Amino acid sequence: MRRPLFLSGFMATGKSTVGQKLAERTGRPFVDLDARLSARLGATIPDFFARAGEAAFRAEEQAEVRRVLGEASGEAAPVVALGGGALLARELRLEVLDAAVVVSLSASPAEVARRAGGRGGRPLLDAPDPERRALELLAQRALAYAEAHATVPTDGRTPGTVADAVLAVWQRDPIAVAAGERSYAVEVGRNLVAPRLGELVGSTRSVLLVSDDNVRRLHAERARAALGERDRTVAEHSLAPGEREKHIGSVEALWRAALAAGLDRKSTFVGLGGGVITDMTGFAAATFLRGVRWIGVPTTLLAMVDASVGGKTGVDLLQAKNAVGAFWQPSGVLCDTDLEATEPERGYLSALAEVVKTALIGDPGLFTLLEQHLTEVRARDRDLVAELVRRSVRVKARIVGLDERESGLRAVLNLGHTLGHALEAQAGFERLTHGEAVSLGLVAALKIGERLGTTPAAVRERTLHLLTGLGLPTDLGREPLAEAAQLIGLDKKRAGSRLKFVVARDLGRVETLDLEVSELERLAVALQ
């Protein structure tokens, strides 16, 4: 419980009551935002509402939320009961989701009207038909309440029972990926599969568990046991391991397995494996019966820090990496770092290139952490691995929340991937791992950025030193750049003859440049 807990949700859902119980139980300070705001304004909320209007009230409310965030830290992190409209502004909501654990409490319109009936102080429910008014407001605010780390229903439950459920979320300290009604949480830690996988799948009666032959031998029994606790039908399908299996024929095999097992639209797919498996499981789920739920259980560092988070799913088409796919968010992701412990060393080390990329994009502190703990990182210190995963996911979740479908900002996550994907494809998806190709792609991006006058030499030198220290390839002189450059035009970010190329301006600061594909090809070949 390193971060503060913010209780969100509609009025009369019990936020103050539950918040007080949790504060007493955990010994944390309790903040009732409405009470604190009323004291600051020198007026009751209804009086201020009537005098200044809702817009003025919301501005004061947002400022108060930011003050609370600025005061919260460590063991003194408080439990905060918010007003029903406190997180309606998305910019503020994303700030709070990043800095705190947000749990939305929900109740039916009828229950809201019953609880609020006859009480003053709720100007927005002051209507002839409070239940109808509650229904209207809930519909307007549905997306805001959905963007949370979890939603806990309160109808027919005691405050103590609700507090138990909220505390469990707070203790897990998940990372929220804000995607409207498709929002979900990523959990990072050890021994997560047994206690959490069945809970995430929920009341689903039928599941397709997807893995590859290597992962199946190592981890499928644990996943199968967790899924079978509620007498579900658990069908399994295992694919051959490796990037070469990432094609539409493998996805068809998953569709056929789901069809043969009698799965329906209320079924759930579970992707247990590396990035190839989670990408294909997500794509199969997006397209089976026009879309079913899926859960990601990544077993490799690469899948944990990148592939399984953000909703990008798909397959390769010939030499075009991830050329066919869909944006289809999972319902949850379990990054159980105990599973990663069985990953071969080459896969683990090469995935560190994605961690370096993430640090360059949005976490200079992560970059410094890697530099200062090279030995422990390479030795796979379990606590350190969990920290690398958590910080990487946090950066990616922040960016996905701002740009779910890569219409702008999210393109920065492709730093190092333009030439990296080309090198990976030129090598037939066999000679280089994805992470090794990204490492080389990062070197290329930094050198090209330096030639274009955007990347400082010091950033390039420091990054090359870190990549080398992590045991990753950095020598572009040994790579077939001319042949790989010819594949840059297959990049899925290409628009006509131009392509958005990501460059680093400093640690934690990147931008995209709009370049001609031919110019980028020329710059890539010149690196030889």
Image (cartoon, grey):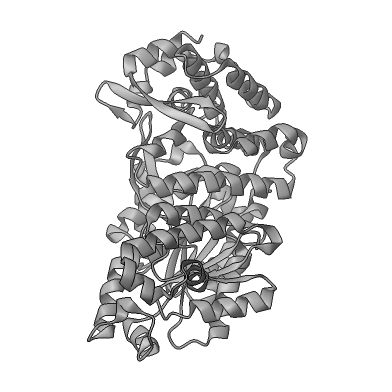
430 relative to 205 in the view: left or right: right
Residue at (39%, 58%) from the top-left corner?
59
Residue at (37%, 50%) from the top-left corner?
283
Identify which residue, 66 or 314, lies in the foreground. Answer: 66
Location of residue 146 with respect to 433 vertically, above or below: below
Q: Position of residue 479 (x, y in %)?
A: 53, 15
357 relative to 13 in the view: left or right: right
134 relative to 6 in the view: left or right: left
Q: Quadrant of residue 46?
A: bottom left
Residue 95 visible in the shown view: yes
Q: Position of residue 320 (x, y in %)?
A: 36, 30
Q: Quadrant of the N terminus?
A: bottom right
Residue 292 visible in the shown view: no
Residue at (60%, 44%) from the top-left corner?
301
Q: How many marks?
A: 0
Q: Position of residue 44 (x, y in %)?
A: 43, 76
| Residue situated furthest left in the rendering | 128
Residue at (33%, 24%) from the top-left corner?
499
Q: Position of residue 127 (x, y in %)?
A: 25, 83
348 relative to 245 in the view: left or right: right
Q: Quadrant of residue 205?
A: bottom left
Location of residue 126 with respect to 97 vertically, above or below: below
